[in-house]
Amino acid sequence: MTPSPRIPVAAPVLDGREREYVLECLDTNWISSAGRFIQAFETAFAEACGVRHAVATNNGTTALHLALVALGLGPGDEVIVPTLTYIASANAVTYCGATPVFVDCDRVTFNIDPSAVAAAITPRTRAIMPVHLYGHPVDMDPILALARQHNLYVVEDAAEAVGARYKDRAAGALGDCATFSFFGNKIITTGEGGMVTTDDDALAARMRLYRGQGMDPQRRYWFPVIGYNYRMTNIAAAIGLGQLERLDHHLAARARVAHAYDARLSEMTDRLVLPTSMTWARHAYWMYTVMLTDKVSKDRDQVIAELDALGIESRPVFHPMHTLPPYQESAGGPFPRAEHAGARGLNLPTFGALTAEDIDRIGVALAKVLA
Ligand SMILES: *Cc1c(COP(=O)(O)O)cnc(C)c1O
C-alpha cells in the first residue's frame, strides 16, 4: 500500500493567468520594480477593496511599517495591538520607535476586544491596530467609535483577510489605512509581497514617497526624507494580478473547505470548539482554527505531533505577543482569553485545493488523536 501523501497546512493555488503574466515580464525584460503589472495590480486591488489607493510593497511587514511611518508615528507614541496576532503587527510598531500596548481578545472570534481597547487608551495613544485574525473581520464599529472619540488612527492589519467583509464593507476599507500580506501561505500570494490601502490622497502620496527610498517624485535623486526600499517587483505583481482576478474563486474554495470541516467535525464538538462566523461577517477563512476543549487531556503540541505522524500538518495558534521574549518584560497581562487560545488552539490545513477526501482523512486522523 502506498502511503497517503502528506497534507500541508497551506499551499498556493496558481490556477489563473499567473504563468502567462510572469512570462510577459521575462519576455519584455520588465522584471524589477517598474512595469505595467505593478500599477495594474494596485488599481485592481484598490477596486476590490472599494478604496481610492493601493500601494504595493515587498511584504506585509513592510506594508505595516510603511503605513505607520507615513502616519508619522514615532518614539513616545503608543499603538494598541491585540496580543493574539503574528509578531509582525507588533514589530512594525517597534520599528518606528513607538510602543505596542497589548490587549486581550474576544472569547468567540479571538479578535481584539473593543472593551479592552477602551481600557488601554492613554494620553500617548495615537493608533489602534485591529487584526482580522485568521480571516474573520474585527467588529469594527466599536473600534471606530473609540478612535473618533479619542482622535486616534485606525490601521487595519488585514494580512490574513483579503476578501473578508464587515457588514457591507471590505476589510481594507474600514480604517484610515489597511495592510495586506501576499506571502505564500496567505489567501492570495505574490511569493512575498504586501499592500497598503487608503482613501486618503495625502497619506497615499507619503507612502509612495517612503516606499521609494524617499526620492522626490518631481526631482530625481533628491531625497527630502529618509525613506526605504519597500518596492514590489513587476514579477510579484504579475503573480498578484493573476491571483486577484480569481479572488472570488479562491474565497469560494476556502468557504467550501470550511463548511466541509464544519460538517466533518460536528461529531467531535465535545472535544473541539469549531470556529464561529458572526452574522455581520464574511469570513475569508485564511486558517480554519479549532480549540481543544477540557475533555482533551493531551496538550495541544502533542496533538499537533500526533497529527504530523499521520501525515497531516497543522500549526499552533500564535503565542500571544506578551509571552514572547522581546515583549515579555514591557507587555503587561495576564490576558487569559488570548493565553487560552495560544495554548489550546490549532490551525488545520486550509487552502483551496483541499479535496473532500483530504478533509475526511483529516477528520479520521483527528478522531483517532482525540479519542
Ligand atoms: C502574514 C502576516 C503579516 C506579515 O506579512 P509578511 O508578508 O509575512 O511580512 C502581518 N500581520 C499578520 C497578522 C500576518 O498574518
Image: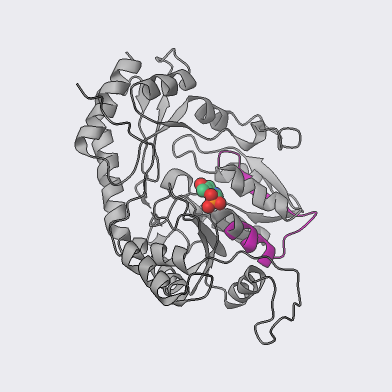
Is residue 104 covered in magenta? no
Q: Position of residue 177 (x, y in %)?
A: 56, 64
- Seen at 62% across and 72% down, the residue is 203
What is the tally of numbered marks visible in this picture? 0
**Between 168 and 179, the one nearer to me in the picture:** 179
**Range covered by the magenta-colored residues:** 63-85
Q: Position of residue 54 (x, y in %)?
A: 50, 70
- In the picture as drawn, the residue positioned furthest to the bottom comes out as 218
The quadrant holding residue 40 is bottom left
The quadrant holding residue 168 is bottom left
Q: Is residue 60 above or below residue 266?
A: below
Residue 265 shows in the view: no
**Between 184 and 19, the one nearer to me in the picture:** 19
**Between 126 and 183, the one nearer to me in the picture:** 183
Q: Is residue 210 above or below residue 257?
A: below
- Image position of 281 (left or right of 29): left
Q: Position of residue 279 (x, y in %)?
A: 34, 47
- Seen at 48% across and 61% down, the residue is 172
Indicate how the structure is coloured in the image. Answer: one colour
- Image position of 68 (left or right of 240): right
Figure quadrant of the C terminus:
top left
Q: Is residue 257 above or below residue 191?
A: above
The quadrant holding residue 328 is top right
- In the picture as drawn, the residue positioned furthest to the right comes out as 76
